[in-house]
Image: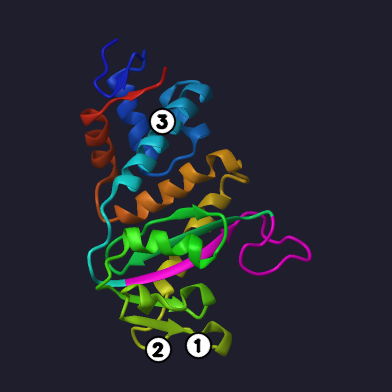
């Protein structure tokens, strides 16, 4: 059966477009299977391929041009691990991300929150002429020495949360949105967390656009392969 969106598949174009439409409006895989009249296994294979392609597109996205950029990290995982607190809490996945205000976000899983781990990501994704906003975490000390001359900080430890344009509300709101969205899956395996994270990133970056049409165009240009 010919399908311009998938190589070597028995899924019709009509069914594939239905699945992409359901995915675009964030319908759960179990409900997709019922609505599309396909097995849960088939739906899972297609959605996994869709998420892999989304992740590829996110990684290929160009660096942020100069503007206002917020930097922050967050831990994803169990809500609380007894006796463990702070950044890099044991058993959780640490994610770092810059967000350009009124534009888009980028996320990356990191081993820890050290300068050695975070700085290469900042240098790769954030233009040196950008206005940088961070909290008071020590890993952001000395950004000026690496060319980021416009660096402003908000010290949460001193009960500072916003002072005019000096805040990191945008990236913190994204972390909250991502955690709420991921919680509906009632547990995500570490091997697939990256793909779900990138889906959250992609959805935010295109929230004012027709996600259905964007995805169809993506797969029409380069079909996926389920084999």
Pointer 2 residue: 163
Q: Label 1 neighbourhood size at 10 Å, few (<14), some (14-19), many (20+)?
A: some
Nearest to N terminus: mark 2 or mark 3: 3
Q: Are marks 1 and 2 in contact (CB under 8 Å)?
A: yes
Q: Position of residue 63 (x, y in %)?
A: 27, 57
Where is residue 15 drawn, in percent x and y?
A: 34, 23
Secondary structure at badge 2 equals: loop
In the rendered image, which residue does mark 1 sit on?
Answer: 160
Residue 13 in view in this figure: yes
Measured from the top left, where is residue 157 in percent x and y?
58, 85
Q: Which residue is mark 3?
A: 49
Name the dominant secondary structure of the magenta segment.
Answer: loop
Q: Is residue 109 a member of the stretch shown in magenta?
A: no
In the rendered view of the protein, which quadrant contains the N terminus? top left
Tell me the crowding category of disc 3: few under 14, some 14 to 19, or many 20 or more residues within 10 angstroms, Cα based: some
Name the spot of residue 152 as percent of width and height, x first: 38, 83
Mark 1–mark 2 Cα distance, whole angstroms, equals 8 Å
Q: What's the distance in space between the residues labelled 3 and 1, CA to CA?
A: 43 Å
């Amino acid at each position: 059966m010919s399908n311009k969106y998938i190589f070597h598949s028995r899924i019709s174009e009509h069914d594939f477009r239905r699945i992409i439409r359901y995915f675009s409006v964030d319908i759960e895989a179990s409900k997709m299977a019922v609505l599309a009249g396909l097995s849960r296994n088939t739906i899972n294979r297609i959605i996994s391929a869709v998420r892999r392609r989304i992740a590829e597109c996110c990684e290929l996205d160009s660096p942020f041009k100069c503007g206002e950029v917020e930097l922050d990290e967050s831990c994803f995982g169990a809500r609380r691990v007894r006796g463990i607190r702070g950044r890099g809490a044991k058993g959780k996945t640490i994610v770092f991300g810059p967000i350009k205000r009124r534009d888009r976000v980028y996320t990356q899983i990191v081993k820890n929150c050290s300068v050695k781990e975070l700085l290469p990501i900042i240098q790769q994704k954030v233009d040196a002429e950008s206005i940088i906003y961070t909290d008071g975490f020590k890993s952001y000390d000395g950004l000026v020495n690496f060319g980021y001359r416009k660096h402003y900080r908000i010290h949460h430890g001193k009960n500072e949360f916003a002072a005019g344009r000096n805040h990191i509300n945008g990236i913190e709101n994204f972390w909250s949105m991502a955690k709420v969205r991921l919680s509906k899956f009632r547990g995500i395996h570490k091997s697939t967390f990256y793909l779900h994270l990138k889906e959250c990133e992609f959805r935010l970056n295109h929230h004012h656009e027709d996600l259905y049409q964007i995805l169809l165009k993506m797969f029409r240009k380069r079909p996926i392969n389920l084999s």
